[in-house]
Amino acid sequence: MLQLRSRVIAHLISCPATSPASPVRRLLAAAAPAVSPSPSFVVEEYLVSTCGLTRPEAVKASAKLSHLKSPAKPDAVLAFLAGLGLSAADVASVVARDPQFLCAKVEKTLAPNVVGLTDLGLSPSDIARLVSLSRHKFRCRSIVSRLHYYLTLFGSSDNFLRALKRNFYLLSSDLDGVVKPNVAYLHQCGLGACDIARLCIARPSLLGISTERIRTAVACVEGLGVPCGSPMFRHALNAVAFLSEEKITANVEHLKKMFRWSDAEVGIAFSKAPTLLTRTKESLQRRSEFLISEVGLEPAYIACRPAILTYSLEGRLRPRYYVVKFLKENGLLDHDRDYYAAVMISKKVFVEKFICPHKDAAPHLADDYGAACRGEVPARFSFT
């Protein structure tokens, strides 16, 4: 592979800057089939020695390439990929996931796809990323028309590639029968183009499910007190889109039981922190026991400030509670100072406001806080 890549690079460098040849023409020239120096061609060995696959990967991939009798076509494909800027590791990954990529037609498929994608505004690095992420879809001519739609939907090639990295099935979804109707329905729900793009970057698989499933999810979101068009609607839909109605009902019941909330309080909490419905029962139970039993917060107080439940118990909630309680018990902080205010600020601001001002009165406080963040309980933080 390295030898082949060197040949391609040397070819590209040899083209003068004033040459009228386009980058694609240079790629085609670099991809011209080379005559194999070996009289015999063994696919498995070629995959290991030239493509960089591991032996197990090569054994698996060679089953799909048993018809190959010559390295001419795969050599052309590898040279083309190297010319696009893919690293040896990237090429090996592409081949391992889609061995038949080595049989793609450079002049009839790959090169025209590069031309079409370039015309859409994709940079060479974008196209290289797309090859790595799209698997077999890059050797289909339909990829250009699909990208034309998705670039408009996501707003940029970078946004689309981020979504594709999360779900490469985007390029396989039925545009006219599924994707476009889903996008139209999301518009009806009050989401603007930017909101839909953000939602689909975070949850690209939403585009590939039936519109009826999205309707069901929207109904659940509204039933929990988050109406279409509200600022939190996108976040709420993202949280419950792939939860069944039974799972949502069970999670709501867990919240009511663990935090002693009414249906209305669950709605208040969900409308401010929709991801509560995606958290494990165990993690929520531990936070409930700490915040209600140890800190002494009222259930209604927590419901109105549910963000507190999304923070790390060991790394944030417990250590900061220890510091605030220590300061109050030693007369260094007003007893009416709100614990929630201490939790919400960044670690840097917390240290500046709650630790640095007391370095003379409590010189050990910074070390004790650091120990608490590591899961330890310093003796000075053992309150009776």
Image: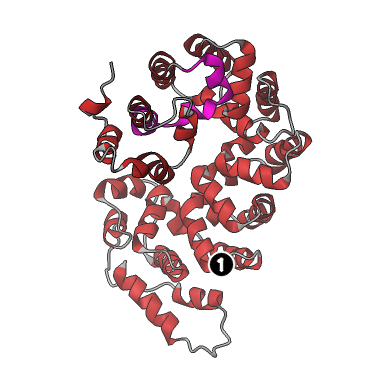
Does the magenta-highlighted stretch encompass residue 131?
no
Q: Which image quarter holds the C terminus? A: top left
Residue stretch in magenta: 297-322
**What amino acid is found at the position of numbered circle 1 in the picture?**
Ser
Residue 250, percent across and down? 53, 12
Residue positioned 52% across, 42% down in the render: 167
Depth check: give the residue in front, 66 or 137. Answer: 137
What residue do we see at 68% from left, 26% from top? 226
Query: In x, y percent, where is residue 52?
Result: 30, 58
In the rendered view, tell whether residue 16 sits above or below residue 240.
Answer: below
Number of residue marks: 1
Quarter-wise, where is residue 32 in the image? Answer: bottom left
Judging depth in this view, the residue of 253 and 99 nearest the camera is 253
Q: Is residue 365 above or below residue 79?
A: above
With 327 as the anchor, is 171 left or right in this view? right
Residue 247 in the figure: left or right of residue 363: right
The residue to which callout 1 is attached is 123
- On whether residue 317 falls in the magenta region, the answer is yes
Percent position (x, y) of residue 70? 37, 63
